[in-house]
């Protein structure tokens, strides 16, 4: 038994070595494996952000007072708003929003300074371009917070008998969307690399006729599957290390958790990615077909993972569907490790889901692969 097991391991080892040599002989594939993930992380890290700065703003000041000027300056000094023009005519504000010259319009009514002086509070109107509802909501939140801070600076809460509310974000205290998004990009990149490498490699063997040669060799179906998936699992872990270093060193994303927790979750996550890639390879006849199928799987998996949109805002049926998406569970873990320092016990449900999905997908894909090869 031990001799047979040793011989099996040796055959798998030789196939793994062969796969790595084949990867290194193809410079394009090597660039995809090592360079593309870093480029994708840098691009997504800067592009995928819900933070807004320098929002073009037009001010319509009917009051023309020192107080109205100070309030507009408070908006500008925050860094969130950039005043692109002043006017005293409401139609200029409407025209600027229509033409896209401004995303936010601030209208200060007559009597603004007088109302503040009497301590009865003043009313201003903020108009936003609702074409992009997310940007409009964020801009309104910024304006509301600045207005509250400005009012508090004129009349402290203790003086008017109000409540002095002091908020603090327990995790991600800067409320930086980059700290939230970059760890999620890590999960997206690993999934994409696993899907493409696994599905294309097997189909390529079939196209050039070497898969049949492997099937008639002493390799069993299990050994062939192991030899085909282990190299890409190793590459996935290498990509994890590379993009994690870039996330920490380049973007300064905090890492509060344990490295072992992250690696364990990544291994379970890789099982799902490799299983889906192997499944695609059994359904595709050409590399082009496998490439298109990989993206057909990749996009819904990302959209239903909570990467861009909160799962709680999805219809209830889709919320249940996301439970079958390994990306969702991995993003919960990777964000928890990076930002919260959460461990195994705090995310036991996500680890269990990744294990079940990984084993199930690999088992199903391996069964189809054996039948297809036979």
Image (spheres, rainbow, N blue to C red):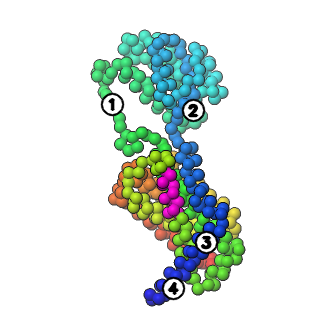
Categorize mark 4 by other alpha carbons within 10 Å: few (<14), some (14-19), many (20+): few
From this view, report whether residue 236 is shown above or below residue 309.
below
Q: Which residues are magenta?
A: 236-247
From this view, report whether residue 247 is shown above or below residue 34.
above
| First reached walking from the N terminus: tag 3 or tag 4 | 4
* Residue at (53% x, 22% y) in the render: 106
**Mark 4 or 2: the one toward you:** 4
As for residue 284 lying within the magenta part, the answer is no
| First reached walking from the N terminus: tag 1 or tag 3 | 3
Where does label 2 land, which residue?
130
Cβ–Cβ below 8 Å for labels 1 and 4?
A: no
Where does label 3 land, which residue?
21
Where does label 4 land, which residue?
7
Q: CA distance from mark 1 to mark 2?
A: 30 Å
Q: Secondary structure at mark 1?
A: loop
Visible residue check, residue 324: no
**Mark 1 or 4: the one toward you:** 4
* Residue at (61% x, 22% y) in the render: 94
* Residue at (51% x, 85% y) in the render: 7
In this orientation, which residue lies closer to the viewer: 113 or 201?
A: 201
Q: CA distance from mark 4 to mark 2?
A: 66 Å
The quarter of the picture where the N terminus appears is bottom left
From this view, report whether residue 336 is shown above or below residue 47.
below
| First reached walking from the N terminus: tag 1 or tag 4 | 4
The image quadrant of residue 15 is: bottom right
The image quadrant of residue 174 is: top left
As for residue 245 lying within the magenta part, the answer is yes
Where does label 1 land, which residue?
165
Q: CA distance from mark 3 to mark 4?
A: 21 Å
Cβ–Cβ below 8 Å for labels 3 and 4?
A: no
Visible residue check, residue 176: yes
């Amino acid at each position: 038994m031990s001799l047979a097991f040793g011989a099996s391991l040796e055959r798998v080892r030789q196939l793994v070595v062969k796969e790595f040599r084949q990867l290194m002989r193809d410079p394009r594939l090597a660039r995809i494996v090592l360079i593309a993930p870093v480029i994708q992380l840098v691009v997504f890290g800067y592009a995928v952000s819900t933070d807004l700065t320098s929002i073009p703003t037009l001010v319509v000041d009917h009051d023309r007072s020192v107080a109205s000027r100070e309030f507009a300056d408070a908006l500008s000094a925050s860094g969130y708003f950039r005043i692109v023009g002043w006017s005293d005519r409401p139609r200029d504000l409407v025209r600027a929003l229509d033409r896209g010259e401004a995303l936010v319009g601030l209208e200060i009514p007559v009597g603004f300074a007088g109302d503040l002086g009497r301590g009865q509070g003043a009313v201003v109107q903020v108009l936003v371009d609702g074409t992009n509802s997310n940007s409009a909501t964020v801009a309104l939140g910024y304006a509301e917070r600045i207005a509250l801070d400005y009012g508090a600076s004129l009349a402290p809460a203790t003086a008017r008998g109000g409540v002095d509310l002091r908020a603090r974000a327990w995790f991600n205290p800067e409320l930086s969307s980059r700290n939230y998004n970059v760890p999620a990009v890590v999960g997206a990149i690993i999934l994409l690399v696993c899907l493409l490498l696994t599905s294309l490699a097997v189909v390529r063997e079939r196209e050039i006729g070497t898969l049949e040669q492997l099937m008639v060799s002493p390799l069993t179906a299990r050994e062939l599957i192991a030899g085909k998936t282990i190299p890409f699992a190793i590459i996935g872990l290498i990509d994890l290390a590379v993009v994690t270093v870039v996330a920490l060193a380049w973007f300064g994303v905090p890492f509060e958790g344990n490295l072992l927790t992250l690696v364990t979750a990544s291994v379970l996550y890789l099982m799902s990615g490799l299983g889906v890639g192997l499944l695609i390879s059994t359904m595709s006849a050409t590399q082009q077909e496998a490439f298109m199928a990989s993206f057909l799987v990749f996009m819904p998996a990302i959209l239903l993972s909570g990467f861009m949109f909160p799962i709680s805002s999805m219809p209830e049926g889709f919320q249940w569907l996301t439970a079958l998406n390994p990306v969702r569970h991995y993003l919960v873990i990777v964000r928890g490790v990076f930002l919260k320092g959460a461990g195994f016990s705090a995310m036991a449900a996500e680890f269990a889901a990744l294990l079940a999905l990984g084993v199930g997908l690999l088992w199903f894909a391996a069964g189809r692969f054996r039948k297809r090869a036979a």
